[in-house]
Image: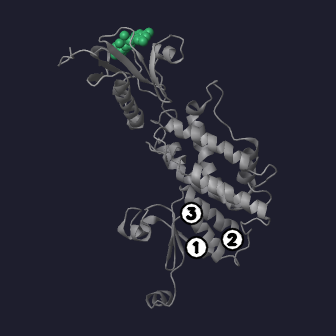
Amino acid sequence: MALIISILAGTLSLPTTLYDLPVSNHGARVRLLLYKRGLESAVRVASPMELGGLRGEKYLSLNPQGKMPLLVDGDSCVWETDAICRHLLEKHAAEGDGPSLFPTSLAARTAAEVIVRHHDTYIGPIQGCLYKPAPPFGRFTSRRDALQELVKQLAVAEALADPTGPYLAGEEFSLADATLFPTMVFITHMLPKFEDAVASPAGEAGPRLGPRLSAWWSHTSNADEAAKRVADEIRSGLQPWEERGRWDAMLYAGARDVAPATLFDKILSKEIPSEVVFEDALCLAFRDINPVAPAHILIIPKHRDGLTGLGAATAEHSAILGHLMVAAAAIAKQEGLSEFRLVTNNGEGAGQSVFHLHLHLIGGRPLEWPPG
Ligand code: 5GP
């Protein structure tokens, strides 16, 4: 009663609250910091539903980004995870009994800072490719490209990690560990599901963590009580995702492109020669061997990714389909065609003979309508 009266009278500030859910790797960074520093009692952790959920008016009035986590500390609302961490570390610098999270030497502090920046700039924005149902994943519109970038950025993190450890910036647990560890719980759980999409062209197995990150991951997840606790919290949030089959329909996780290879694979590998008129990272365009008009060009995605024909398209394919259309317009211009037709046949009854999606770009003569 006294507490309620004090709050109503404005004589006692409300407890500092972190709005977060267990499955978020960002919120887990803050919780790991609190556990590690022994500051649990300083911050109440609550569900965003208390404020009507992330899209609720109340929540948005405190955090216009509508994202987790959000720290409400008196009149301050802080919603970038790294800023939340630094706010709490500074505010409670004299409390708690754990490590400060700022290593003693300047070299180690700077190394930790670089790893935090690396995570937040290059890994955090794209790690959604591991679990989000559809693109975009940061700046990537293809899951395969985002996964490959993630693997590349993990190799950079490997180079940034301290070679002797046991933590990322050396002997002391730092903000770098609190930052990368929760995301690594996601990565170690989910990246192996996509091994087909990130296997090297030579057919080697998918990427593994390098020796420094492996040693760090093994030490932190086995010997660090705070990290173990956070990993368990995240996994308890992932469990319902598994049970609901979150990855079942995701290409290269639960789903595979199991249709037989076509002659276009041999054209792509140059085993069958073709007259290429355009090529970029995503598509190849070549003249049809049996042209039905003076200009007859086939435009195909380099990775079929389940697109045996347009009928197999999903939201995952939006970007490549748009890319093929834009490429078609550029090729038409290159061929001097101001009038042309773009056709895709879907199914044998519609004239499809090769089951790797392709656009026919046809022009150079008057084209009748309706087509036969
Ligand atoms: P679809 O009938 O599946 O819509 O189109 C397949 C197209 O591939 C046909 O127009 C056919 O002429 C073309 N095609 C089939 N084999 C080859 C080949 O070996 N080289 C090239 N350049 N085109 C081919």
Mark 2 lies on a secondary structure that is: loop
Marks 3 & 1, CB-CB < 8 Å contact: no
User: Assess mark 2: CB under 8 A from ligand 1?
Assistant: no
Q: Residue at x 59, y 63 (%)?
A: 82
Give left or right: position of 3 versus 184: left
Spatial CA span between label 2 and label 3:
19 Å
- Quarter, ligand 1: top left
Residue to which mark 2 is pinned = 38
Tag 2: residue type?
Gly
Marks 2 & 3, CB-CB < 8 Å contact: no
Mark 1 lies on a secondary structure that is: loop
Quadrant of the drawing holding the C terminus = top left
How packed mark 3 is, by other alpha carbons closer than 10 Å (few <14, some 14-19, many 20 or more), is: many
Which of the two discs, 2 and 3, labels the residue nearer the N terminus? 2
Describe the colour scheme in one phrase: one colour
x then y, percent, for residue 57? 35, 68
Residue to which mark 1 is pinned = 43
